[in-house]
Amino acid sequence: MSASPPEPGVSVDFATEVAPLLETRCLNCHNDVDRSGDVSLATATDLIDSGAISIEPGETSRLIELITPTDGSAEMPQDAPPLSPAEIDVLSRWIASGANWPEDVILIEPSISDRDWWSLRPLAAPVIDPTPTIAPNASTHPIDVLVDAKLRENDLRPVGTADPATLVRRLHYDLTGLPPTPAEIQAYLEEDQSAPNIAYTTLVDRLLDSPRFGEKWGQHWLDVARYAETHGYDKDKPRNNAWPYRDYVIRSFNDDKPYWRFVQEQVAGDALFPGDPDGIIGLGFLAAGPWDFIGHTEVGEAKLDGRIAKHLDRDEMVSAVFNVFMSTTVQCAQCHHHKFDPIRSDDYYRLHAVFAGIDRADRVYAGLSPEQKQRQRRLTEQIAGLEKQQGEIQAERDRAIGEHTAAHDRHIEELIQRHGIEPSATYGYHSHIASAPDTTKWVQIDFGEPRSISLIRLTPAFDNYNAIGAGFGFPRRYRIETSNDAQFSDASVRCVFDASGEDQPNPKLEQIVVETTGDSFRYLRVTATKLSPRRNDFIFALGEIEALDSESGENVALHAAVSSLDSIEAEPRWSVKNLTDGIVYRRVEGESAISNLIQWQRERDEILQKLDTSHFESRLTKIAQSLDDLRTQLRQFPVGAKVYAVATHFDAQGKFKPTEGKPRAIHLLHRGDLRSPGERVAAGLPMLWHSKSSEPDLADSETEAESRASLARYLTVRENPLVWRSIANRIWQWVFGKALVSTPNDFGRMGTLPTNPELLDYLATRLRDDPQQSIKAIVRLLVTSRAYRRASFHNEHNAAIDSNNTLLWRYNRRRLTAEEYRDSLLSIGGVLRVDERGGPSFQDFVIEKPQHSPHYEYHLHDPNNPKSHRRSIYRFVVRSQPQPMMTTLDCADPSISVPQRDESTTALQALTQWNHRLTEAMSKHFAARIKTTPGMETADQQIDLACVLTWGRSPDDHERAMLRNLMQTHGEATLARVLLNTSQFIYVE
């Protein structure tokens, strides 16, 4: 693009002066995707179309007006310093000279290369001077030295220490998530009187050693790990083997696993620690997030929507690893280079390549030896190879058959085109799946009373599963019986049709019609003695049963009751009631069309019987025999304990198939669009800090597992400043309630700055340099500080300077979390099964329609069911329908990484805490407890016990008088419910 020749002495070089200026100051907003204000400056055409410049002599360009400051500020660029006079002069001279822009030049949004940012700099631990030089009573505790220095800088005066009763309750909730018992409170108060420091540190150590510590702190980790036990999305199916990862997290905190090991196991434990079950269970972290069942199993990678599902799956894993372990938002580089941090789009897609060979699936972690696993894998691969051969031979046979049946196939297709109808969604009855054909199944109809029947009709089912179609599930051998006994065990049993002696041909669309003698009977049963093959398994299915009355010809089976040995209830398609609903499968409409269709299919079947396909059938028979043998060998292996994790080998499910370790091809996507792939990228790691350990490329020869192992080592290398700062910030937050960096998942330029960077680096280096990398040691350090033991009192002077208590001049008063509230109800009610740890989760709901899209019905659960009286961390967590009470009380959303929970105060919370059925039930248990506890004879004694259980202290005289009047007027259960709704119970001081 050019105009009149430039005037002498004012020419501007586009490549060296103009292009860099537009790229660095304008293209962040005005690129070909964002087009802020509907303006792009990426190409010459974009610039002309925008109308931002005028190259006519004497006219002022809109671009120059926008960037020229008035009173020190300009309209553009927004939220950034204005261009300098020299930069404005370059653009003005360029426009005046004709705005030359080479046609082949496309400006590219620049990537951030500046790594001079607080979180990317090397860790720098401050030197702690233990000498109290400021005041004689100043704390020499390293945490207090760093916290108090910030307080002095800001003229803040810390409040005093909380009283012992407050501290014992605070410690119990912060370290175990449960209230202290009256005996624990009394013992601590007595010890505190004689040796307060020893009593406090002894209590800290006891709570850190308690298995309840892992149950409380494991919940913190599960929040950021986006843990749940259902897939999410449309078909929110259960993950019945997700719980071993939850138990692994709890166990890791209780065992005080070194943090480097904890990180590595969750990214590449199978590669780095082969033979250790935790190396596989830890991979539950990568699989913990949502998963699109439909996109993976029903759509598949052959279609764009299926590939999008895979892309989102990898994005979720990549984001989780870097958000959680590195507090870095790499996902912002999916469509363009990260606008604030040194992460390029190619960095992001290189990380996709690291995870390109894995999927989320159940995986054996214990119960099989390495040799058994290897043998099992070989058998699985052999079976897959034979199944592929089987499919190829079947396709070859079908092509050969097609040469002889082409005319009939054409006539059938024409009939369907002219007279075809949309088949009903109700397919009929479907038995449970069996592993062998010689399995007996039955289904029967109850007419309600004996009826005289002259004709019975069986209509086969239709389902295109595995390309079976008409006659789906129709038994190879069967019999039809009648009886007046529902159990078919008395002398009234009559066999009216017996096809159990030899294999029967599949009737396809033809009905099986059986004439009877007109005898009266109440029950009609069809028994399958040899089942129909489906795919590697066997079933019994029927579309409809009709029974015609001898006199009226009425179908008395219509809407009759149906029972069966077993049934898959997956409405609307499969259900026992569909067997008598009067709806049968029809490919065409009209009696003539149906008759013609049956005729053409019968003639086609006769042609098939005359064809010599023995050379195909013999090969298929040999393969089938080999498959049976291999599957028999495979079934002999013990099942093994399974965890829902990431895997490369697993049983295919629909269109969801394993990679067997071969990574998928990953391409750099233009603007994140799978329809615009660029060059293929190899696995690599972003250079986020200045270190040799941050080289971007991995070796081309690395396997899928080796690439993840390289990533795990990259995350935990000593020189990585992000990983240590990230976990130090989280530990501080989990102890004090507020993080030093208030955006725990984002330490980049979009995040916040640390309120006390010296303190953060001190904790990070202390954890990193500890040979044991003990999280418990850091927790112990924090809770033994004077800063942690402060009271939560208000102070007008301090609040005027630091109203949010950012610098910790007092303790942060907090609400009980949803889990703490529920667990406390159970504990105070005396029904909490506190020692029942680990294993499959309890369900505080009833599942309806589990085969299709499960409905999780919480209102059907009985709150007095003892199976649910376990700690909340062992609750079955659902994504699509979260537990209503827990959600109201600010429980974490399991579909995303939640680095810090909301803490709200709403009317709905008050209504829930008063009216919820669990509160009502536990109030009654609580009332019974205070009445039946030995020694609680008087009303005042019972009230004191109730207050100690809920508040951690006895009431004062005024409180006692009020509560006595309440109990005498409304009873113990009301007293209990009131106490469970007081601020003293709901808040930790």
Image (cartoon, rainbow, N blue to C red):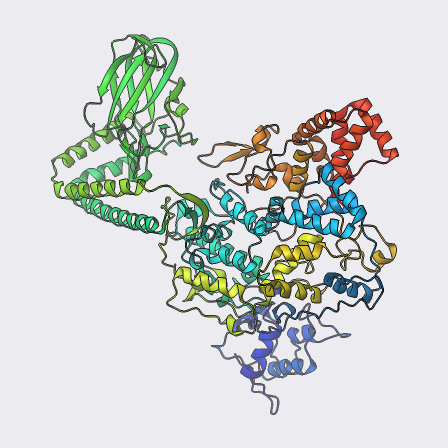
- Identify whether 953 is placed above or below 645: above
Is 722 situated above or below 624?
A: below
Q: Residue at x 40, y 60 (%)?
A: 704
Identify the residue shown where x is 28% and y is 14%: 455
Q: Where is residue 608 in the image (x, y as percent from the top left)?
A: 16, 36
627 versus 457 height, above or below: below
- The picture quadrant where one finds residue 82 is bottom right
Instruction: Answer yes or no: is residue 750 visible.
Output: no
Q: Is residue 317 left or right of residue 120?
A: left
Residue situated in front as seen by the camera: 336 or 355 = 355
Q: Where is residue 982 in the image (x, y as percent from the top left)?
A: 77, 37
Which residue, as the protein is rendered here, is positioned at the far front? 194
Q: Position of residue 188 (x, y in %)?
A: 75, 44
Q: Which residue is drawn at 37% across and 57% down?
A: 661
Q: Where is residue 599 in the image (x, y as percent from the top left)?
A: 20, 29
Q: How many numbered discs, if any? A: 0
Q: Between residues 332 and 26, which one lies in front from this camera angle?
A: 332
